[in-house]
Image (tube, grey):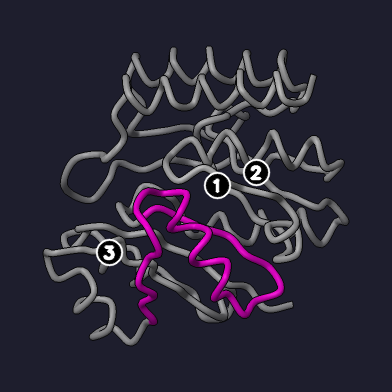
Amino acid sequence: MRLTLIIPAMNEADCIGGVLKDVDPDVIHEVLVVDGHSTDGTRDIVEKMGFKVIPQEGTGYGNAVRTGIKHAAGDYITMVDADGSYRLEDIPKLIAVLEEGYDIAYGSRYLPEAGSDDDTIIRYVGNKVFTFLLNVLHGVNISDSLFLYVAAKKEVFESLDMVSGGFEYCIEFPIKAHKAGFSHKEVPSFEKERIAGDSKVNALSDGLKILWTMVKLKFRQS
């Protein structure tokens, strides 16, 4: 089974090289860097390192992921951020879950033998609140709702009617996957500090969008 790695990237010239150097070709058979209209030379760095760049359709994280899925040739798909915070050596653990027969594998920072070097008190508390609401409102039963380190067969991604353009994609995916009846299992993962620069997630505005997505999907489900 071939694996495609999708990396959404927008102005990550200081980070993307550090992510791509960790790609293991024995595990990852295709890398698609989805460029969100970068102006800092991100695309040039990726191409010089011999990896494929896909121009993003629209703006935002969710649109970047959907663009990558449309172009993916692999049987399995996973994704990591371009800032270097995801540990690529955890990918085999995700794939092992799929080979056990589960439809979806999620990485979690809050399982035993997991953790984060980049979690703040605000992010930690916010994640716990959102995870509680996700599990209560939608019955998903995961431990880390805002860390979308996920792997699944391509047809799983393609079967879900995903509409979120921004970071709310991270909460829409587990809700719709659970509603569709897909099985899942979590594995411990570790979040590293981003290599350089600042996060593009706005705790207030993106948090409100995530909350609204959870509530909206609950009403539609009802």
Which quarter of the rendering shows the C terminus?
Answer: top right
> Decide: marks 3, 2 in contact (CB < 8 A)?
no
Q: Nearer the viewer, residue 82 or 94?
A: 82
Q: What amino acid is found at the position of numbered circle 2 in the picture?
A: Tyr
Mark 2 or mark 1: name the one nearer the start of the chain. Answer: 2
Residue drawn 53% across the image and 12% down it = 129
Residue 148 x, y percent position in the rendering: 54, 42
Q: What amino acid is found at the position of numbered circle 3 in the picture?
A: Ile
In the image, residue 46 above or below residue 116 = below
Assign a secondary structure to mark 1.
strand
| Left/right of residue 217 with respect to residue 8 in the rendered view | right
Q: Dot 2, crowdedness within 10 Å: few (<14), some or many (≥20)? A: many
Q: Is residue 67 magenta?
A: yes
Residue drawn 14% across the image and 71% down it = 41
**Residues in magenta?**
52-81
Residue drawn 59% across the image and 20% down it = 131
Assign a secondary structure to mark 3.
helix
| Left/right of residue 28 with respect to residue 201 in the rendered view | right
> Decide: marks 2, 1 in contact (CB < 8 A)?
yes
The residue singled out by tag 2 in the image is 106
Q: Dot 3, crowdedness within 10 Å: few (<14), some or many (≥20)? A: many
In the image, residue 47 above or below residue 79 = below
Q: Nearer the viewer, residue 195 or 41?
A: 41
| Mark 1 → mark 3, Cα distance in angstroms | 17 Å
Q: What amino acid is found at the position of numbered circle 1 in the picture?
A: Tyr
In the image, residue 170 above or below residue 157 = above
Assign a secondary structure to mark 2.
strand
- Residue 194: quadrant of the picture: top left
